[in-house]
Amino acid sequence: MKKGIHPEYRPVVFLDPSCDFSFLTRSTIKTNDTIKWKDGNTYPLVKVEISSGSHPFFTGKQKLVDTAGRVEKFNRKYGKKKSS
């Protein structure tokens, strides 16, 4: 490999704050956050919105999102106007 053209490949912790699930792997992603890991070392930290710890496919649980009233609100705003 040529020197100086490849990104740094290093250990990184990925954290899913919604379910407090984290894992250590290797990546080239850039981040300014760090975290102290279980082994006592400090690693770069990347926060993710969804992971295998929170995804319904892996957990078997469906998260309910508040969608009540969205269709009615849309129809009130953009629905057909009654003609006089």
Image: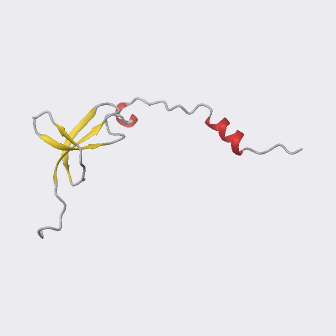
Q: Is residue 57 left or right of 40 when viewed as pictured?
A: right
User: Picture quarter containing residue 9?
Assistant: bottom left
Instruction: Where is residue 39? Give x, y as percent.
Output: 10, 35
Give the residue furthest to the right.
84
Give the residue furthest to the front.
32
Instruction: Where is residue 22? Give x, y as percent.
Output: 24, 36
Residue 17 position (above or below residue 84): above
User: Picture quarter containing residue 74?
Assistant: top right
Q: Is residue 60 left or right of 41 when viewed as pictured?
A: right
Give the residue furthest to the bottom.
2
Q: Is residue 38 left or right of 56 when viewed as pictured?
A: left
Image point 40% across, 34% down: which residue?
A: 56
Residue 34 position (above or below residue 1): above
Instruction: Where is residue 51? Give x, y as percent.
Output: 32, 39
In the picture, which quadrant includes the C terminus? top right
Image point 10% across, 39% down: which residue?
A: 41
Instruction: Where is residue 1? Give x, y as percent.
Output: 12, 68
